[in-house]
Amino acid sequence: MNREPYFKWLLSAAICILLFGCQQIEEDGWGENTGGILKVGTRSVENEEIPYPISLFAFSEDGDCIATQVVENKKEEVQLELASGRYRIVAVAGYSDDYVLPSVNRWTDVIEMLDEDAPETPLMMGMADVNLDAKTEDQLEIILSYSVSLVDVTLSNVPSSVAEVVVTMSSFYSSMNLKGEYLNPDYSFSLSCTLDTLGQWSAKPRYVFPGSSKETVLSIAFKMKDGTKTTYGYIWKDSPKANQGYHLKGDYSGNLALNGVFVIAGWEKVEEVEFAFGSNSKPDDEDEDSDLDLSALPEVGSFWNGSLVVDVGEVDASGAEVLLMSLEEWILTTSQIDELISGYSVNGLSQWRLPTYEEAQLLKSNYSDDNRKELNERIAAYDGNLVGLDGEERYLCLKSNVYYSFIFSGSSKITKAGDKRTYNVRLVKSHRISLSPISSDS
């Protein structure tokens, strides 16, 4: 897939709007404290095309919307009639049917993304404060910058038995107010990939508000031609930033392993963040002489030491960290959690805990709907006395020491938990598994 056109566009200079302040106005017809007409002209750096329509808003110091105008094209004359005083001028450009731009009354009104597919067009915003006086001439420049991140994906060497590929990412903000503040942090979006003539599964670029957490959960789902589905999860220890682009480039290595690289192609800089996940992942800089024996590393979805392996981290020089989930389940209130955790152990493994918010997103993504039913069948075959995951009841997790709850359903939200009702509880544990170098004797 040739990305040069839109990446060239992404790396172009920021678009500027010039707001020419009140021209000197004849005093006839104007009182001493009256204002004038705020005339607006536009231009762009390096002759880049301005993304119309552009919405202009003038807010009072208290946040009330005093005047507004939608500029449909560069030929349209733009002017705002304002009394003398201090204003915040906000410009919004590049919005489309993918966004809901409200009827604005306050600068706390929000712009929202409509659905879980993420928009196909980037949103831009700029703002500046101005003090208007009817008897002076001021000039104000507002620089528009992208309020969103760009994300696309390309996967190579995907088996021919795969019929569909979907990459899901979370957590992100889903809205932004006209003060430039991001809101509603539980948004996730999916990138549906198509098979191109080069044998790669690719998704066209989408635009999303920045990540809302310090970590980003990635879930790559393969639906096979026989109807079965496998999902590979990875927690990236960072999150997308506004005004930058992220290209996910993965190479499927087979046997539950997916290796790839994030290429961040942004307006400000280009950065690479390498990642690997899956039971057979190995670091790129590992020498052949120091190859590790991965046979002791369990696969995601397998049972190990009386628990379920729900994630396998990157392999380093000595081993890898796995995330385990208890096969036991409890129904408790939040006040009973500490007592449970303090006394719980499995085959000598102690220090279990509730899932973090990010881990809950990974669990929800990997074990919802059909995947949950398949896992429950394997749990029943492993031990008929165990209960499977519930697809309707809420499970507890923690975010910044605050209790939240989630459902093993892809369409559900993670919300704050109450202190009265009961919740289902599954504990997790991060456990490091040491690996030995492969013996040179063969």
Image (spheres, rainbow, N blue to C red):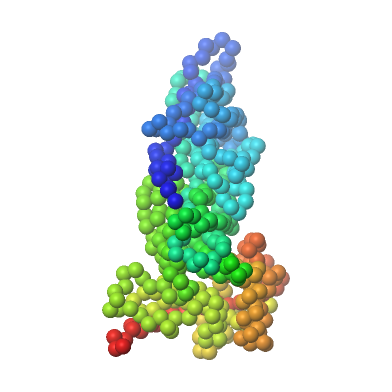
Q: Is residue 126 above or below residue 134?
A: below
Q: Nearer the viewer, residue 180 or 186?
A: 186
Q: Is residue 286 above or below residue 127?
A: below
Q: Nearer the viewer, residue 184 or 1?
A: 1
Q: Is residue 3 above or below residue 190?
A: above
Residue 188 visible, this orientation:
yes
* Residue 100, position as x, y percentages in the image: 62, 43
Give the image quarter of residue 370. bottom right
Q: Is residue 435 left or right of residue 104?
A: left
Give the image quarter of residue 259. bottom left
Q: Is residue 120 above or below residue 322?
A: above
* Residue 55, position as x, y percentages in the image: 56, 33
Give the image quarter of residue 143. top left
Q: Is residue 135 left or right of residue 382?
A: left
Position of the C terminus, as image quadrant, is bottom left
Q: Nearer the viewer, residue 350 or 138?
A: 350
- Give the tally of numbered discs: 0
Q: Nearer the viewer, residue 163 or 137?
A: 163
User: Residue at coordinates 65% horizontally, 68% vertically from top-left?
Assistant: 369
User: Residue at coordinates 61% horizontally, 35% vertically from top-left?
Assistant: 64
Residue 248 visible, this orientation:
no
Q: Is residue 407 left or right of residue 165?
A: right
* Residue 81, position as x, y percentages in the image: 58, 23
User: Residue at coordinates 61% horizontally, 66% vertically from top-left?
Assistant: 404
User: Residue at coordinates 56% horizontally, 10% vertically from top-left?
Assistant: 28
Residue furthest to the top in view is 28
* Residue 244, position as x, y percentages in the image: 43, 49
